[in-house]
Amino acid sequence: MHRALITGGTAGIGAAFARAFAGRGAALVLVARDPVRLDETATQLRDEYGVEVETLVADLSDREAQQRVADRLETDVDPVDVLVNNAGFSVRASLLAEDLTPHDLGFEVMIRAVLKLGGAAGRGMGRRGGGWIINVGSVSALVTQNNYSAIKAWVGNYSESLGVQLDGDGVQVTALMPGWVRTEFHTRAGIKGSSIPGVLWLSPDRLVEDCLRDVARGKPVSVPSKRWKLIAAVLRTTPRGIVARLSAVLSHRRSREK
């Protein structure tokens, strides 16, 4: 019987992870900012799957909230043995902007919180002799579009570094690198996605099932679907100058979609 803590667990990829683990009979700890939506999601999962669902209201841009979630991960009372660091949002603000507020929020939620929670989970799981940490990154880490790309590049490198540090402790770390996923993420970011071919879109449930298969195989990086594996492989081997030019083209297209 496992217990999975999922940040951003009420929508998109996080909700898909919650359904996947609930379907496997795992207990859940859902972390999100909106208490109403959190309670609704927890009730739905309890009713549909008959699993235990604990909720933690936490805005991960707040360091006290980060600490509360970290404490939950590290405790040996009803221990968590799966962490999904999923909470996040698009950061499309200009790198030249004087106002760094959007960037600071991105750093707190998608870098500091990931670091804080990954460390707490690693300590607790390592002490207990096993566990799994899944950090949600992005294929956009392989291009150079904006600060979101830079943040997700950090997530990927951090995940592999954490996996190295936890080697021998029974804790596996996997970086999930999704491509385009049909969730409300893009709507919130103001991205219509009308120029993206339909074949490139994945459902969140399919994405999560592919990821969990990779986790079961002990893979440090999971890129769901053959088409996105191919895209990621091409991006990794393409000269960075060409990647930069491609990134510029993609950025111009996104700007026109606003």
Image: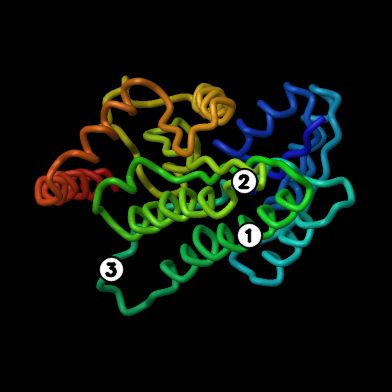
Q: Label 1 sits on what residue type?
A: Gly
Q: Is residue 25 found left or right of 217 in the rendered image?
A: right
Question: Closer to the camera, 75 or 25?
Answer: 75
Q: Nearer the viewer, mark 1 or mark 3?
A: 1
At which x and y percent is residue 107? 47, 66
- Which class describes the residues within 10 Å of circle 3: few (<14), some (14-19), or many (20+)? few
Secondary structure of the residue carrying tag 2 is loop
Q: Is residue 44 visible?
A: no
Q: CA distance from mark 2 to mark 3?
A: 40 Å
In the image, farthest residue toward the bottom: 98
Q: Label 2 sits on what residue type?
A: Gly
Q: Is residue 165 visible?
A: yes
Secondary structure of the residue carrying tag 1 is helix
User: Which dot marks residue 119?
Assistant: 1
Residue 64 against residue 178 in the figure, above or below: below
Question: Closer to the camera, 12 or 149?
Answer: 149
- Quickly name the residue at label 3: 95
- Which class describes the residues within 10 Å of circle 1: few (<14), some (14-19), or many (20+)? some
Q: Is residue 4 found left or right of 220 in the rendered image?
A: right
Q: Earlier in the sequence, mark 1 or mark 2?
A: 1
At which x and y percent is residue 10? 66, 41
- Which class describes the residues within 10 Å of circle 2: few (<14), some (14-19), or many (20+)? few
Q: How many marks?
A: 3
Q: Nearer the viewer, mark 2 or mark 3?
A: 2
Query: Mark 3 and mark 1 in contact (Cβ < 8 Å)?
Result: no
At which x and y percent is residue 8? 62, 47
Q: Residue at x 53, y 66 (%)?
A: 108
- Quickly name the residue at label 2: 168
User: Which dot marks residue 202?
Assistant: none
Q: Label 3 sits on what residue type?
A: Leu
Secondary structure of the residue carrying tag 3 is loop
